Amino acid sequence: MTDARLRSDYFTLARYGPAAVALFKFIEAGEAYLRKAKEMQNKWRHCMSVKQTKKRIQGDIKRQNETLLPYKDRQDSLVEKLKHYTTEKEQAIKEKINLEELLNVCQALASASMSTSIKH
């Protein structure tokens, strides 16, 4: 089909009549179809390779998530404990501040009573 004489508009082919020209055009279309099919086959193989890789990676992710599940449960319980201890710490800080204020009041009262007892 690469020969220049084998073109649908070549006069030798036209000599055999319109059926020969139509047959030649049919063969050319078949060749074009095969070339395109070969291109598409390579693209299809690549696409299938990507799909297989995607499926393998999804399986890996699922297995890793299943492996991490006990750690996730442990993490959740530790987060709850941390929340509880944070609340306790905040309460302890508030209580310390109240006790420091009470201590300051007591010291003020003690120094006031000491100064009044010294004057008498």
Image (spheres, rainbow, N blue to C red):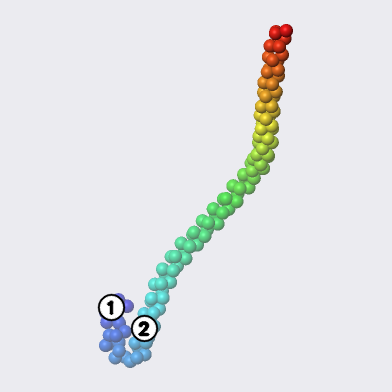
Residue beneath label 1, please?
Answer: 3
Q: Could one spot residue 85 in this view of the protein? A: no
Q: Amino acid at mark 1?
A: Asp
Please give the label number shown on residue 119.
none
- Mark 2 or mark 1, whichever is nearer to me: 2
| Quadrant, the N terminus | bottom left
13 is higher (above) or lower (below) than 99: below
Amino acid at the residue labelled 2: Lys
Compared to residue 26, the image places residue 67 above or below, namely: above
The residue positioned 52% from the left and 60% from the top of the image is 51
Query: Picture quarter containing residue 31?
Result: bottom left
Residue that numbered label 2 is attached to:
25
Percent position of residue 47, x then y: 48, 62
Q: Quadrant of the C terminus?
A: top right
Q: Position of residue 37 (x, y in %)?
A: 43, 71
Residue 28 visible in the picture: yes
Task: Name the residue: 47% across, 65% down.
Answer: 44
Q: Earlier in the sequence, mark 2 or mark 1?
A: 1
The front one of 28 and 108 is 108
Q: Decide which of 85, 35 is in the foreground and name it.
A: 85
Label 2, label 1: how far apart the Cα atoms are: 15 Å
Residue 77 location (% of width, % of height): 68, 39
